[in-house]
Image: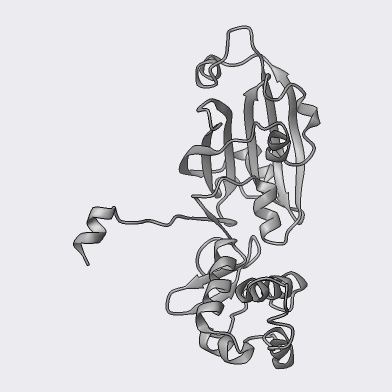
Amino acid sequence: MGDVELDEIGAIFAPEGLGVPGAGPLYLQLRRRLAAAIQRGQLAPCESLPAEREIAAMTGLSRVTVRKAVQELVASGQLVQRRGSGTFVAPRPGQGAGQGAGQVQLPLWRLNSFSEDMALRGKTAQTLWLERGLSEPADDEVIRLGLEPYEQVARLARVRLSDGVPLAIERSALPASVLPAPEAITHSLYDYLGARRMRPVRAVQRISAINIGGGEARLLQLPVGAAGLEIERIAYLDSGRVVEITNAIYRGDAYDFTAELRAPVAAGRATE
């Protein structure tokens, strides 16, 4: 268990305090306890967790319950699982270069805002604004957003940070009819849109590997040419209307995008 003291591990996985009536399902109680231990530093970045069977024995919970709690923390990016090695606390950006994949795991099937993703990991999201205002749309924005030629777009450009570390640069364009006062966005765009019943319900994303250029590298505190990910997203309302176009640059040492794949129903039946 590395630098974590045995008495601390015993306290984290002690059966006392689990199974409290009204505190929710057992897996949720365990998940909250582990997330709190990670946030407090009792479980340090890159630290390995005991095996599922050991956690089950220490907590008195079933392995199914333990596995569900662990898998939720993996999905939220707080834990990382490595085949043949075990389960580890996710390293912070810049750590663990020799220990495998990126530091923040984001499932591709979930349409969350940056603020929501960070909150799921017990982190604080911050914003460095680069642009926030109304302007004339580019020709392609008129077509993609379905605008009339006289309509304006709201532009948001910002560096997204987590606990003071710059992780991404986001540039978004929305119809001015959806976001008439861009300066009203101080924290979460999706919270604002949700309050107006204009939050997107689905999106199409294209992810490309890039080398980050000079200006963006400086904003992300990276060397010029560092590996990164570029994501272009088109987000839709339930009605099918395009409500947001976003281009984002993510630092490659901080993100790992995951996707769950399922076989078609017919293929699944063929293997039964």
Closest to the observer, 248 or 270: 270
Above or below, comparing residue 82 to residue 176 in the picture: below
Q: Residue furthest top?
A: 150
Q: Residue at x 42, y 57 (%)?
A: 260
Say left or right for 144 vs 160. Answer: left
The colour mode here is one colour
Above or below, comparing residue 75 to residue 200 in the picture: below
Closest to the observer, 141 or 237: 237
Q: How many marks?
A: 0
- In percent of width and height, residue 185 lies at 77, 34
The quadrant the N terminus occupies is bottom right
Say left or right for 36 vs 28. Answer: right
The quadrant the C terminus occupies is bottom left
Q: Residue at x 55, y 46 (%)?
A: 225
Q: Residue at x 67, y 71 (%)?
A: 24
- In percent of width and height, residue 237 lies at 56, 31
Closest to the observer, 127 or 21: 21
- In percent of width and height, residue 30 lies at 65, 76
Q: Residue furthest front?
A: 21
Q: Quadrant of residue 119?
A: bottom right
Above or below, comparing residue 209 to residue 237 in the picture: below
- In percent of width and height, residue 79 lies at 59, 69
